[in-house]
Amino acid sequence: MESERNRCRILLFTGEGKGKSTAAFGMMSRALGHGMRARVIQFVKSDSAVGEQKFFSKLPEVSWEQFGRGFLPRDPKSPVMEEHRQAAAEGMRAAIEALGNPAYDFVLLDEVCFALANELISVEPLLLALRSCGGGKIVAMTGRNAPRELLDIADTASELKMLKHGYEHGIPAQKGVEN
């Protein structure tokens, strides 16, 4: 049991509903308020104009990197998928480094579940890094379709369910809400 207490704390936000990344960034705000240092690694996403990046990347306690190429093509056999796989592999290398780096108290792996579900990366290297990180590090992971292996290793997992979304009623993405 002692080794379990010494490992990192793992939180997972998944599901079809809005708010997975928002919840993780809220937790990061809490950690920063306690003087912790954070690293954000975004998979799939490529827009640097979103509000959370504009805000958090200004803080010296936050290191922020995007390893995405944006929306995935509908056809998983599209030649463009190789670019997405390469970007996700770079993100995985950064994630593994961050999980083992004592300079970071909080690591946010945004959309890692989506990258895994779309077979851009493999779950095994991430599981190994999660099992070996320790020292009270907090890890928050987000994205739809979290694989069972991440649910199993997580200490806390939340599934956000979509009940209603403004998009369904023709409301476009809005600064401060979706971006």
Image (cartoon, rainbow, N blue to C red):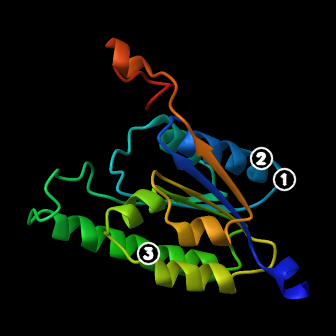
Q: For numbered disc 2, what is the local secondary structure?
A: helix
- Work out whether residue 171 can be spotted: no
Q: Is residue 2 above or below residue 15?
A: below
Q: Point out residue 28 in the picture as x, y percentages from the top left corner.
A: 68, 50
The residue sitting at the right extreme is 2
Q: Point out residue 85 in the picture as x, y percentages from the top left corner.
A: 26, 71
Please give the label number shown on residue 92.
Answer: 3
Q: Point out residue 23 in the picture as x, y percentages from the top left corner.
A: 64, 42
State the residue at coordinates (45%, 30%). Answer: 178
State the residue at coordinates (47%, 75%). Answer: 94
The N terminus lies in quadrant:
bottom right
Residues tagged 3 and 2 counted as in contact (Cβ below 8 A): no
The first of marks 3 and 1 along the sequence is: 1
**Amino acid type of the residue tagged 1 in the rendering:** His
- Work out whether residue 90 can be spotted: yes
81 left or right, relative to 155: left
State the residue at coordinates (51%, 34%). Answer: 18
Disc 2 target residue = 30
Disc 1 target residue = 34
Q: Is residue 150 above or below residue 124?
A: above
The residue sitting at the left extreme is 79
Q: Residues within 10 Å of mark 3 (few under 14, many from 20)?
A: many
Residues tagged 2 and 1 counted as in contact (Cβ below 8 A): yes
Q: Point out residue 158 in the picture as x, y percentages from the top left corner.
A: 65, 48
**Amino acid type of the residue tagged 2 in the rendering:** Arg
Badge nearest the viewer, 2 or 1 = 2
The image quadrant of residue 4 is bottom right
108 or 79, which is in the foreground? 79
**Amino acid type of the residue tagged 3 in the rendering:** Met
The first of marks 3 and 2 along the sequence is: 2
Badge nearest the viewer, 3 or 1 = 3
